[in-house]
Image (spheres, helix red, strand yellow):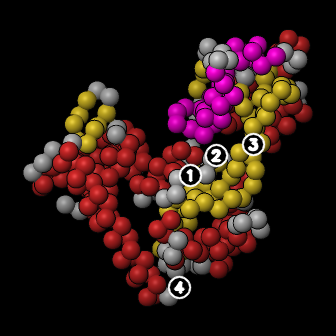
């Protein structure tokens, strides 16, 4: 048994599925399955019930999950204590990014971090917002940018700015739909990010029952792809204000004036890591870069 096997156990338990857990841990599925099998052999118990829909903890697995999590937390705490003894923060910090670097001010953040904390290497990981939260909880990210509603209390969040999304449609549809009521807009094809993304939740929140739900959904996991599909006449979507403004300016799309959605951009990290020297250093630089109220 080693720490990587325990991380695999905890991550599979969180996702309930080998594929998503393997992607989060950057492992192949056979390697991840090997970790679980090795633990089950060493413990002499079955940790998961396997089915066509995923992995479910057995009663034994549920009892051992809490202790496995405590062991991982204890090792992380030991590493933090060693860093504090060395004085200057040292190590590799994995930071999740969800939008373009210019929106997140990542360039300025990296430059200032390098000058102030030269012993810290910041590794950027492009993620969807929901994936960022899962990886924070799984321990494969140290901090992440995130947009959406404030996460649960196990994660600390620093507010950075509002993000506005507008209902965008192909320019060719303007004559028919620009002044149309919501009921008509709702029945057109909609382009959304996959579950469980923040973008999808924002789109689906527009569809309040008993109003019609979207009859046809086209999935795309990237904002630029979503915008391109709107411009190409595939469907309607929520598009971030900075992106749709450029698209409207080049006559590729139009904004339906009946609705817009505002959400919040955050930096998020585990609350039990607030005193972690690496996270504290990142937050220190972030406050200077953003000059954000409350940041």
Graded by Cα atoms within 10 Å as few (under 14), some (14 to 19) or many (20 or more), the crowding at tag 3 reads: few
For image coordinates 50% across by 88% down, the residue present is: 87
Is label 4 in a helix, a strand or a loop? loop
Is label 3 in a helix, a strand or a loop? strand
For image coordinates 52% across by 33% down, the residue present is: 195
Q: Which residues are magenta?
A: 181-209
Q: Nearer the viewer, mark 1 or mark 4?
A: 1
Quadrant hosting residue 140: bottom left
Judge whether 118 appears above or below 206 on screen.
below
Q: List the residue tagged with mark 3.
A: 262
Label 3 with label 2: CB-CB less than 8 Å: no
Q: List the residue tagged with mark 4.
A: 88
Label 2 with label 1: CB-CB less than 8 Å: yes
Q: Nearer the viewer, mark 2 or mark 4?
A: 2
State the quadrant of the C terminus.
bottom right
Q: List the residue tagged with mark 1.
A: 151
Label 3 with label 1: CB-CB less than 8 Å: no
Q: List the residue tagged with mark 2.
A: 148
For image coordinates 20% across by 45% down, the residue present is: 59
């Amino acid at each position: 048994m080693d720490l990587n096997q325990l991380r695999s156990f905890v991550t599979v338990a969180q996702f309930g599925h080998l594929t998503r857990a393997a992607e989060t841990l950057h492992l192949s599925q056979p390697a991840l399955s090997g970790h679980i099998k090795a633990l089950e052999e060493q413990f002499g118990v079955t940790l998961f019930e396997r089915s066509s829909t995923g992995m479910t903890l057995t009663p034994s697995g549920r009892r051992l999950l809490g202790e496995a999590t405590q062991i991982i937390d204890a090792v992380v705490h030991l590493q933090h204590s060693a860093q504090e003894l060395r004085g200057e923060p040292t190590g590799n910090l994995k930071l999740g990014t969800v939008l373009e670097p210019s929106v997140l001010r990542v360039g300025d953040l990296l430059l200032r971090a390098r000058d102030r904390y030269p012993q810290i290497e910041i590794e950027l990981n492009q993620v969807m917002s929901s994936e960022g939260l899962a990886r924070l909880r799984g321990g494969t990210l140290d901090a992440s940018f995130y947009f959406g509603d404030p996460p649960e209390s196990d994660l600390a969040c620093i507010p950075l700015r509002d993000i506005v999304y507008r209902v965008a449609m192909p320019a060719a549809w303007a004559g028919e739909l620009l002044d149309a009521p919501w009921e008509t807009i709702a029945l057109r094809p909609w382009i959304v990010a996959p579950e469980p993304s923040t973008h999808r939740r924002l789109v689906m929140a527009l569809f309040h029952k008993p109003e019609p739900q979207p009859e046809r959904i086209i999935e795309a996991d990237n904002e630029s792809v979503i915008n391109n599909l709107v411009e190409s006449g595939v469907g309607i979507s929520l598009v971030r204000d900075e992106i749709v403004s450029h698209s409207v300016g080049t006559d590729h799309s139009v904004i339906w004036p009946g609705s817009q959605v505002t959400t919040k951009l955050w930096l998020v990290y585990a609350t039990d890591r607030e005193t972690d020297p690496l996270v504290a250093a990142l937050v220190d630089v972030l406050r200077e870069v953003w000059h954000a109220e409350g940041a």
